[in-house]
Amino acid sequence: MNQALKILDIFIKIQENSDVFRHKGEGLLDEISLAEVHCIDWIGMIDHPNVTKISEKMGLTRGGISRISKRLLGKGLIESYQEPDNNKEIYFQLTKSGQSVYDEHKKIHNQARQEWLAFFKHYSDDEQAAILRFFTEISALFDSESADKID
């Protein structure tokens, strides 16, 4: 991945953590928290998503993911299921409404990616390397401070 894409990924994460990047679009995401949207996103991307897999991807505790998934189940955005040969493990899948949120989130991210990639073209490779280092360090700071603050 080139430097501009790495900078972009980190920049979007920083924006989301600081609540600057709004995940709102035509009212579809108005009643869903950012953590819930990102949980939906991972459920849509992971093969056989469960609490453990989602917590690893999101960098949150299993307890935090359990709370988020209960809210999503209550809102009808996900549903749980079990494999016939494994009655112990509970997996999640998106409902039709959850798929709509997933699709809208992807659309918003893709639009933001295109806008920011155009912006980063104004910087040389050396400048992008400095920006990348800066945002990587900020992102690490956010990760260490907010890992268990989801509720």
Image: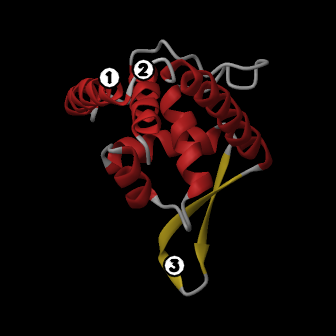
| Residue that appears at 46% across and 30% down | 8
Front position in the image: 35 or 131: 131
Q: Secondary structure at mark 1?
A: helix
Q: Quick one: quadrant of the C terminus?
A: top left
Foreground mark, 1 or 3, reads: 1
Say whether residue 39 is left or right of residue 79.
left
| Residue that appears at 40% across and 51% down | 57
Q: Secondary structure at mark 3?
A: strand
Read off the residue under disc 2: 123
Front position in the image: 11 or 145: 11
**Residue 37 image offset from top left, x and y in percent:** 57, 35
**Amino acid type assigned to the residue bearing label 3 in the image:** Asn
Callout 3: 10 Å neighbours few (<14), some, many (20+)?
A: few
Q: Do the CB atoms of the residues marked 2 and 1 lie less than 8 Å apart?
A: yes
Q: Which mark is residue 75?
A: none
Callout 2: 10 Å neighbours few (<14), some, many (20+)?
A: few
Read off the residue under disc 1: 127
Q: Secondary structure at mark 2?
A: loop
Q: CA distance from mark 2 to mark 1?
A: 6 Å
**Residue 83 image offset from top left, x and y in percent:** 59, 78
Read off the residue under disc 3: 87
**Residue 109 image offset from top left, x and y in percent:** 61, 32
| Residue that appears at 42% across and 45% down | 65
Mark closest to the chain's N terminus, 2 or 3: 3
**Residue 17 image offset from top left, x and y in percent:** 39, 22
Say whether residue 117 is left or right of residue 79.
left
| Residue that appears at 48% across and 32% down | 35
Say whether residue 41 is left or right of residue 24.
left
Residue at the bottom extreme, as displayed = 85
Mark closest to the chain's N terminus, 1 or 3: 3
Is 84 placed above or below 107 here?
below
